[in-house]
Amino acid sequence: MTLTDEQILDSAYAIFLEMAGENLNEQQIALFNAQFAEHGSLQLMDTAENWDEEIGVLIDPEAFAEVWIGLEDANGALTHVFAKVLVSTNPDAPDFHIVW
């Protein structure tokens, strides 16, 4: 059994919100708070192959999903990425990693 796309997005967003205060500076938090309701974006991406370089551990890209959390412009293009969240797709083996 694996998480649905909606569950993956919800999980990544919850993790982001829990950890943002410790990892984003005051300007980034202010920008997020001011614009996320109107321009916020949670995008499920193809899992990058270089996560081992980012986190120092090899991961199985089939066992994880990558979510980018940021702001988008009027055309739907991401203009600012606050975090890239790697979330386990297995509900029995929760795990995550974040690049801020």
Image: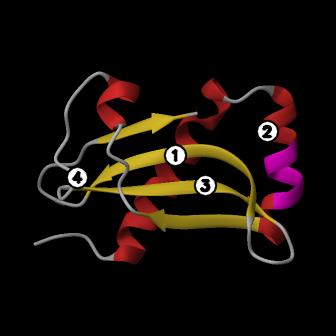
**Separation of disc 1 and disc 3 at Cα?**
6 Å
**Separation of disc 3 and disc 4 at Cα?**
19 Å
Q: Quadrant of the N terminus?
A: bottom left
Are discs 1 and 3 less than 8 Å apart at CB?
Answer: yes
- Magenta stretch bounds: 31-35
Q: What amino acid type should be assigned to the residue bearing mark 4? A: Pro
Are discs 1 and 2 less than 8 Å apart at CB?
Answer: no
Q: What amino acid type should be assigned to the residue bearing mark 2? A: Ile
* Residue 68 appears left or right of 93: right
Query: In the image, which disc is placed on residue 61?
Result: 4
Where does label 3 land, which residue?
Answer: 69
- Magenta stretch: includes residue 56: no
Q: What amino acid type should be assigned to the residue bearing mark 3? A: Ile
**Separation of disc 2 and disc 3 at Cα?**
13 Å
Please tell me which residue is depicted at 41% across the width and 76% down the height of the picture: 6
Where does label 2 land, which residue?
Answer: 29
**Separation of disc 1 and disc 2 at Cα?**
16 Å
Query: Crowdedness of circle 4 by 10 Å Cα count: few (<14), some, many (20+)?
Result: some
* Residue 68 appears left or right of 72: left
Q: Quadrant of residue 47?
A: bottom left
Judge depth for marks 3 and 4 and give the one in front: 4
Provide residue 81's location: percent of width, then percent of height. 68, 48
Where disc 4 sits, the SS reads loop
Q: Looking at this view, is 4 or 56 the one in front?
A: 56
Upstream in the sequence, badge 2 or badge 4? 2
Query: Crowdedness of circle 3 by 10 Å Cα count: few (<14), some, many (20+)?
Result: many
- Magenta stretch: includes residue 33: yes
Where does label 1 land, which residue?
Answer: 84
Residue lying farthest to the top in this orientation: 56
